[in-house]
Amino acid sequence: MAVSFEVSEKGYYGKFGGAYIPEMLYPNVEELRQSYLQIMADPDFQADFKDLLKNYVGRPTPLYFAKRLSESVGAKVYLKREDLNHTGAHKVNNTIGQILLAKRLGKQKIIAETGAGQHGVATATVCALMGMECIVYMGEIDMERQKPNVERMRILGAEVVPATSGSKTLKDATNEAMRHWIQHPTDTHYIIGSVVGPHPYPDMVAKFQSVISEEIRKQLLEKEGRENPDYVIACVGGGSNAAGAFYHFMEEPEVQLVATEAGGLGVDSGKTAATTSIGTEGVLHGSKTILMQTEDGQIVEPYSISAGLDYPGIGPLHAHLFDSKRGTFLSITDDEAMEAGVKLSKLEGIIPAVESAHAFAALEKMEFKADDVVVVNLSGRGDKDLATYIKYGKY
Ligand SMILES: *Cc1c(COP(=O)(O)O)cnc(C)c1O
């Protein structure tokens, strides 16, 4: 076993990861780094986490054999139904884990940043559940574009603070959240929503999301008599649902890991979020990874039809999966994703989130054998994307 996919002591996956943070943030991140593994390994913590996942989130989510889709694709296709979680996506697995951890650390307040609002809603949800104060930073432009999620967060009791600097989008909201955390290090925990940010966030989030592949193994053993599928396919924005779906298969070389990125209007169109296609190595949000940047290191604004994949980088674990060739990365255009979303709706009666539709589009691009077992991670439901489906129109 030459290549490892376990994070190193200093937070590296191969050459990616680490903690590239301003000096002022060091005590906060260091407190987390020193305690997260110990807290997560504590049986009481695990019991609380498992209890909420079961009774509040509704886990385990089904592993559903998609008969009509399988016939169409020519392989045995299973769907991991993260869309059936409370709040409609996988993100809540992580926010439940992090808020329990924040309580163990004695924190009373939660901050988060959000782009499309999905992570903000998942954070506001668990703050309401725990009776904790919640501030969500969101770019002013994103607040305008994602009004229903802003109101959802407010109904749940969160304060949504507009980020008014720079391009008034996600990276500006991130800067505001970081600034807040520096000013309130003792009473506040910062919940990051994907496998990004400085160590230990990518590892911590991957471990909370790893419940997805833990369940897939058990469920496949029941249904197919073996724990390992031939393929696991998941979409990648920052990479948390993919990290969770891949986690327990990363050291199983016979399982092919397929990550789909948002190609937007095409990787050469200038309107894309396909990080591994056009990205280069650099530092983004506190870790060394692959990101979309100009030659002098300015971040290139990403574009995707799906707000959740509209991110200019990928987490360091995914950069390592790509760099080591352990993972196969495919770029899916807006149109390919929408077509796959409509196809799943017609064949299985499941309207997927547009993010998740990017994973289904991979089925159209790959060659399978009839007895291949393929698991697609259905990261979220499409209710939030109705306007996008209507605008696309071809159904
Ligand atoms: C946020 C989101 C994503 C992308 O985030 P990852 O961290 O890459 O998983 C994918 N699917 C859905 C439904 C989402 O809400």
Image (spheres, rainbow, N blue to C red):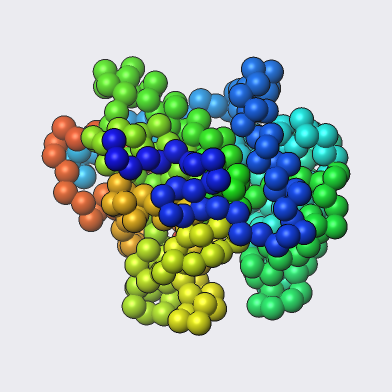
Picture quadrant where residue 247 is located? top left
Q: Is residue 385 above or below residue 204?
A: below
The residue lying at 44 percent from left, 63 percent from top is 290
Q: Quadrant of the C terminus?
A: bottom left
The residue lying at 27 percent from left, 21 percent from top is 226
Question: Where in the figure is residue 35, as x and y percent of width and height?
Answer: 69, 34
Going by the picture, which residue comes out furthest to the left? 369
Front one among 124 and 70: 124
Question: Where in the figure is residue 330, as x and y percent of width and height?
Answer: 31, 58
Front one among 125 and 395: 125
Left or right of 1 on screen, residue 159: right
Residue 347 in view of the camera: no
Picture quadrant where residue 166 is located? bottom right
The residue lying at 41 percent from left, 69 percent from top is 279
How many numbered marks have been drawn onto this rendered protein structure?
Answer: 0
Question: Where in the figure is residue 177, as x and y percent of width and height?
Answer: 75, 59
Going by the picture, which residue comes out furthest to the bottom? 296
Q: Quadrant of the N terminus?
A: top left
The residue lying at 50 percent from left, 30 percent from top is 211
Residue 219 in view of the camera: yes
Left or right of 76 on screen, residue 6: right
Question: Where in the figure is residue 186, as x and y percent of width and height?
Answer: 85, 45
Q: Is residue 318 above or below residue 165?
A: above
